[in-house]
Amino acid sequence: MKAVTPSPRRALVTGATGYIGGRLVPELLAAGFTVRVLARSPDRLRDRPWADQIEIVAGDATDPRAVTAALRDVDVAYYLLHSLVEGEGFDELEASMATTFVDAARSSGVGRIVYLGGLTPPGADAGGSQTAALSPHLSSRLRVGEILRASGVPTAELRAAMIIGSGSASFEMLRYLTERLPAMVTPKWVRNRIQPIAIRDVLRYLVASADLPPDVNRAFDIGGPDVLTYADMMQRYAAVAQLHRRIIVPVPVLSPTLSSHWVGLVTPVPRAIARPLVASLKHEVFCREHDIAQFISNPADGLVGFDRAVELALRRIKEADVATRWSNASVFGAPSDPLPTDPDWAGGSLYSDERERETTASPSALWQVIEGIGGERGWHSFPLAWEVRGLMDSAIGGVGLRRGRRDPDRLMVGESLDFWRVEERIPEKLLRLRAEMRLPGRAWLEMTVDADPTTYRQRAIFHPRGLWGHAYWWMVAPFHGIVFGSMVRNIVRTAEKGDASVGTQQLSGEA
């Protein structure tokens, strides 16, 4: 009799466009799972190297029909949905999404749910005396975990504190604070103890949790081998990065709100995201148990320590091998906004600035310059103007320019690029960016390559919101000739020189 080969288990990953989800998918594929993802904007996954190996269900996590379709015939479901900002009613939305998810998981016969939550201080579980004192961010994560564990579907809630890995928001905050401030006056929370964990250990726990016994339905604390204060982590980061020892003076007057403004100005993490991160740091969070070791053994060489995790993260950054970043998840703007190319524009009037220039460069050389724009190479036009605009945006709580780019040469749909997000990318034809800076309206920047003859076309588009939106366009319109005009000329000139690495600094004196 011929042996029957068992079908691979199917895993559903929610939040696949985010930092953790985008790294978990290839790990599950490598472990032999068939992977399905639920994505509100499937196009944002199409440039991932594993996109053709997975099944994508298009839909929103708030839609019961989409969630039910995604959970059909699923063995293990990974719930990785979290709000990066604490907008009005975000906690109720997160609770509602979790309830929708468990209802669908229960009716679909899902074998297990795995959830990545947040490590909380002692006494902060349901009914604990510290629950009310938690930050809104941590409180919401705790509530979501309780909803999932009460679902009747076996659930493993992995609670982690600070995740150390290239591209994580917590790591970026630590990195930029340490590198940019050799001396700093800091809030008192820098003396609180934290148990960080390396991203590779988080992923290992997540994958292995699919094999937990069916009677396991509980929360597990997960952390690395080191318990450190934030000040300790800054000093140890400085040592690994070969920087001088930092001068850190903690004072009691910097509240989490003030601290988030400070973080938003110094690091690429905007104030809206820095606020919940900083608010979480006011608690001491370290593992109270390591029961997960009863089911998932530590690797032979042990859990990754803090210094090693920093070393690995910095190596990834240096080699431009950052798979996902915190900024992958859209923070500002609405993904459901109509596109400027929609045949029937539903949003009213549009303003545009359109320019073009023929070039002797090949289409591929021109595309190389376009795709390499932003980040350290700049925008090929008056760096001071771009820097001032970025600082203005940061000052009012926007993302500013400091997010940079994940890879110096290649972009992917859905990822951030300074204060833009890549909305469309057709190699050697079109790059469309959607603005995520604070604006009284919505804005796009399109860069197009036409062949025979090679022509560079550039279009800046603005859809004003209210009277202030119209006024804003006319106030900045006189500067478009300077900024956008020189941008066109310098992009073409760089393509003709055949050096895509030439950017703002080299061309800053050219009009």
Image (spheres, rainbow, N blue to C red):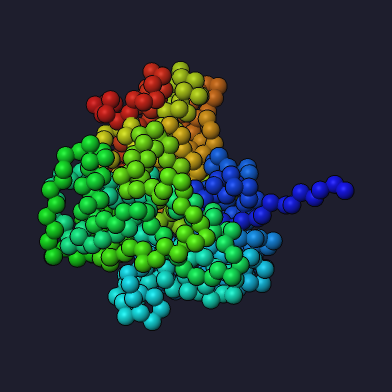
* Residue 461 coordinates in the image, percent (x, y): 42, 45
Name the residue rendered at 26%, 61% in the picture: 193
In the picture, measured across the screen, residue 207 lies left or right of residue 408, that is right
**On screen, 277 above or below 320?**
below
Q: Is residue 145 left or right of residue 313?
A: right
Residue under the image location 45 percent in, 64 percent down: 291
214 lies left or right of 406: right
Q: Residue at x 36, y 42 (%)?
A: 313
Q: Which residue is at 33% across, 63% downward?
A: 286
Q: Nearer the viewer, residue 471 or 315?
A: 315
Quarter residue 387 falls in? top left
Q: Is residue 386 visible?
A: yes
Residue 54 vertical position relative to residue 502 in the rendered view, above or below: below
Seen in the picture, residue 175 relative to 229 is either above or below; the reply is above
Is residue 447 at all visible to an observer of this figure?
no
Residue 129 x, y percent position in the rendering: 32, 80
Image coords of residue 321 (percent x, y):
43, 36
Q: Total label count?
A: 0
Quadrant of res 52: top right
Residue 384 percent location from the top left of the image = 23, 37
